[in-house]
Image (spheres, rainbow, N blue to C red):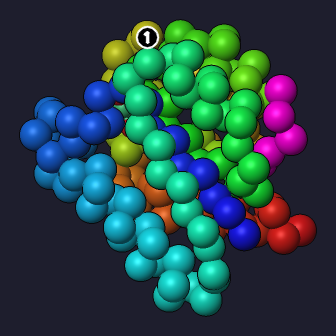
């Protein structure tokens, strides 16, 4: 079982970026916690972690993956990127969209997601726990 975790622009700044919204945990810590969590649910998962601030790089990664599932926090591209949405739809992969914050409780421009329509589900608002919840949902769907 291989799971690709993609984090979009500015997620590499977690820890110091607007901690009142995103918390103080770094992206590397979130990734490590996800690996440890997967062991506690008895899954042998090969994770690939990818972060980019560039839309095209994220699209290239999605197009070239051989993973069984995708957890993606498209960050600000959530609200703008038809291209990332199309990329997810262009490959045969089950994807879950993740957000640390709840974009629906924030500015109006965050209330639209272009990427959610390419995903089987969305987990938002649970901070770093969102990634673990997404993993659970994704594994359930893959094993259906
Ligand atoms: C985010 C929410 C987005 O609106 C924002 O642009 C981000 C992070 C989140 O994880 O809460 O960069 O995706």
- Residue 83, by quadrant, is top right
Q: How many marks?
A: 1
Whether label 1 lies within 8 Å of ligand 1 gets the answer: no
On the image, the x and y values in percent for residue 10 come to 29, 28
Q: Is residue 123 at least partly visible in the picture?
A: no
Q: Is residue 91 magenta?
A: yes
Residue at the spot of label 1: 109
- Which region shows up in magenta? 90-95
Is 119 on the left-hand or right-hand side of 76?
right
On the image, the x and y values in percent for residue 25 come to 20, 55
Mark 1, Cα crowd under 10 Å, few <14 / some 14-19 / many 20+, is few
Q: Is residue 41 at least partly visible in the picture?
A: yes
Quarter of the image that includes the N terminus = bottom right
Q: Is residue 63 magenta?
A: no
Q: Quadrant of ligand 1?
A: top left
Q: Secondary structure at mark 1?
A: helix
On the image, the x and y values in percent for residue 41 come to 57, 85
- The residue at 43%/10% (across/down) is 109
- The residue at 80%/45% (across/down) is 93
């Amino acid at each position: 079982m291989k799971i690709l975790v993609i984090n979009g622009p500015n997620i590499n700044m977690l820890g110091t970026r607007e901690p009142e919204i995103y918390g103080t945990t770094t992206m590397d810590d979130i990734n490590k916690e996800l690996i440890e969590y997967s062991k506690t649910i008895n899954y042998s998962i090969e994770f690939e972690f990818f972060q980019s601030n560039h839309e095209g790089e994220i699209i290239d990664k999605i197009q070239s993956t051989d993973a069984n599932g995708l957890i993606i926090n498209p960050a600000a591209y959530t609200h703008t990127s038809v291209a990332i949405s199309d990329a997810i739809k262009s490959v045969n992969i089950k994807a879950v969209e993740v957000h640390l914050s709840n974009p629906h409780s924030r500015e109006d421009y965050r209330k639209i997601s272009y990427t959610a329509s390419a995903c089987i589900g969305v987990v938002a608002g649970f901070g770093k726990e969102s990634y673990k919840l997404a993993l659970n949902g994704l594994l359930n769907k893959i094993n259906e």
